[in-house]
Image (cartoon, rainbow, N blue to C red):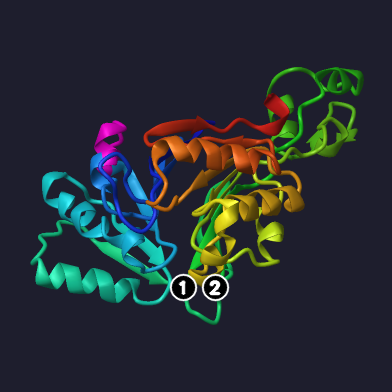
Amino acid sequence: MNLELFILGIGGSMPLPNRSLTSMVVRREGEMFLFDCGEGTQVSLRKAGLRWKKLNAIFVTHTHADHVTGLPGMLMLSSQVDRTEPLYVIGPPRIQEYIDANRSILEMYINFEIVVKEIPPDNLSQVVWEADGYHVRSFPVKHSRICVGYVLEEDKRPGVFQMNQAREMGVPMGPLWAQLQAGESVTLAGGRIVHSCEVMGKSRPGRKITFVTDTLPIDTLAGEVYNSDVLICEGMFSGDAKQTAREKKHMTVVDAALIAKKAGGVRKMGLIHFSPRYTNAQLKHLVQEAREVFPQVVSLKERMMISVSYLDEE
């Protein structure tokens, strides 16, 4: 089952001629989810060859301008597509107000339902999207405004079917094998019952994607990002700008790397939401700075695609 990340924007605060604001698409089989929607998202989406119509939901971390200014344009695309399914927008308080105000002032023509779900400030840690085989969960971070991170995590997968074990137990190849693989017990011709657990290996983990941006390096983050196959995490400033980062309630690339290292089980981390003070050439140095603490850092580029494999299939 395909699981892919498309990086649409890596910038923070303000867009630059060659750097859009923070945004990422996760595509899982036929479903697509957008995480944050900074200015330039619509253009990046088109350049990446992704179809707006396929979006199931938009997850917003917080209502600062550099994370939501792309939303009005994205919603107005509705007049150009034939869509019947609702679009879900999920985020912390005031996201409903923001969408309603834009729809009213811009007199948007929307030809399908937009369902907004606000995450209450007293319950920022909760499952906000649940479907067959996976869920999306929000968790609180610490910024100058109510802000959340998100985890998309798949359910555990069944273990590998042990064919030789099934044969030894007298289970004939065919429909009974399928029943055992589906977790059911089967009854053989002589009346013997064979349980699924007798011929199936241990359950295998699904995949986990974590999206963290705009936060101080709080202690709870390590527990949230633990065992992430891919962690997309803000690294707004270099390590020597730690004081500025604290004043603005952001993280340095060193902070992000230390969290990934402390968490354990993080297979790959991509840095995002860079300050506009850094040129693209300087970003290479920031990535290298993070790698000195946590070597599994990926240098993200806009419209980059990351394919996420299962741990046991590498």
Question: Would residue 57 be found to the left or right of residue 298 on screen?
Answer: left
Query: Could you say whether the residue bearing mark 2 is in a helix, strand or loop?
Result: loop
| Residue hosting label 2 | 124
Q: Residue 128 versus residue 75: which sits nearer the camera?
A: 75
Q: Residue at x 84, y 30 (%)?
A: 199
Quarter of the image with the C terminus is top right
Q: Residue 171 versus residue 62: which sits nearer the camera?
A: 62
How many numbered discs? 2
Q: Residue at x 50, y 32 (%)?
A: 306
- What is the magenta range? 44-52
Give, as a three-letter code, the residue at label 2. Leu
How far across and down, in percent of the image, does residue 37 sit? 33, 54
Q: Residue at x 34, y 68 (%)?
A: 116
Residue 271 lies, with reference to residue 251, above or below; the image says above
Q: Residue 106 versus residue 275: which sits nearer the camera?
A: 275
| Residue hosting label 1 | 119
How far across and down, in percent of the image, does residue 98 sit? 27, 72
Give whichever of discs 1 and 2 has the lower sequence position. Answer: 1
Q: Which quadrant of the view contains residue 180?
A: top right
